[in-house]
Image (cartoon, rainbow, N blue to C red):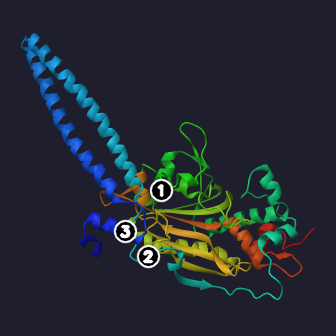
Amino acid sequence: MERFTQSINELVEENLRKRRSKVSLDKLKSLESERLKLLKEVENDRAKKNESSKKVGELMKSGKKEDAQKIKEEMKLFVESLNKKEEKLSELEERVNNEILYLPNMLSNEVPEGDDEKSNKEIIRWGEPRKFDFEVKDHVDIAVGLNILDIERAVRMSRTRFSLMKGKGAALERALINFMLKKHTTEHGYTEYIPPILVNSKAMTGTGNLPKFEEDLFKTTDDPALYLIPTAEVPLTNIYREEIIPESMLPIYATAYTPCFRSEAGSYGRDMRGLIRQHQFDKVELVKVCAPDTSKIEHEKMLKDAESILQALELPYRVVVLSSGDIGNASYKTFDLEVWLPSQNTYREISSVSNCWDYQARRMQMRVKRGGKTELVHTLNGSGIAVGRTWIAILENYQQSDGSVIIPEALREFTGFDKIEKE
């Protein structure tokens, strides 16, 4: 209830402060003030134009053509001025709407306040990190030693931050995809999709990737451009864009495997070694569309769905609630799953599970009709999970002293082998 004791402006300003956002309301307020002033002028001028047109019609009916023509001539410059005002009004409306698109979602009161990831709050820790009696290798040294990863040739044919898996390394990646999809569809009730991996700007805007994060995207030279998806969240969440969904269809559970593409703009020098941060990577994504009063419960359930993958693979992990300074722009509340990586002696993100409340639905105009009223739905998304980082975690957590890697038992029916050894 405390949210409604402040004005909307104060709420938004406070939300921006919590998020440590650089977005300012001053520009938006100035543009909106200018738009409203011009709108009033345009409406008055339109009324004057309509009144003159009506008078001309009356004069023509009464046979006073010369008087009618005189008014037409007098109105000519006025109409030209009105047309220019309408053009400017249209431009102002576009600028206002664009500024609004930069505003982030409101935050849940359950989000801890802080500047960055250091303020994230750990809420779950599962599994004990393995104690090794030999020198631990990172995933690159393990994979190169087993001849299942070739980074040099990938760079030669593409550029840095691309990789080439082969042999049992490629089979392990494929097995993980199939394992995750089977678990989510048969145990958790998600419907599998194979969506487009090139989408238009409207789809990207709907999920909040545009306009704010355009530099992180790869796009075609088409006019208008198409964008390579950074995650299957984009096409899956857009399935019912601009539709009124029957209440009986909710909640909607969707999952998909797709390759994902990110330019990683601004991340130069971070995780340059290996597969942690790639331009192209595989991911199984989870998306939910639900009624507003169920999204908190659905969020918790989605977290459990993602956790079940790591638990089945017996990979140690922890769950954190992202702080206000670390959370994504479109998210109301986010859980991060972080898997243990022995080579780094720390937990690293492997899945983000977010409740976007009605933020994306408003941008997409995706609604539900219930109780005689039409209202915005809530949307949720989460990695279920990042395949490449799971590949890394398996190599590092299941490495053996002789350089081989044991395959987790739950995965063996999908790989067809229980160990990767150098051939």
Q: Is residue 190 left or right of residue 155?
A: left
Query: x, y (%) of residue 120?
Result: 51, 78
Residue nearest the viewer, comparing 102 with 241: 102
Q: How many marks?
A: 3
Residues packed near mark 3 inside 10 Å, few (<14), some (14 to 19) or many (20 plus): some
Query: x, y (%) of residue 36?
Result: 23, 46
Q: Residue at x 33, y 65 (%)?
A: 12
Amino acid residing under circle 1: Gly
Amino acid residing under circle 2: Val
Q: Give the mark, 3 or 2, whose residue is nearer the N terminus.
A: 3
Q: Mark 3 sits on what residue? A: 15
Q: Residue at x 75, y 64 (%)?
A: 173
Q: Residue at x 15, y 33 (%)?
A: 47
In whole angstroms, how far apart are the C-alphas of marks 3 and 2? 11 Å
Identify the residue at the far front of this view. Answer: 269
Amino acid residing under circle 3: Asn
Q: Mark 2 sits on what residue? A: 111
Residues packed near mark 1 inside 10 Å, few (<14), some (14 to 19) or many (20 plus): many
Numbered tag placed on residue 208 in the rendering: 1
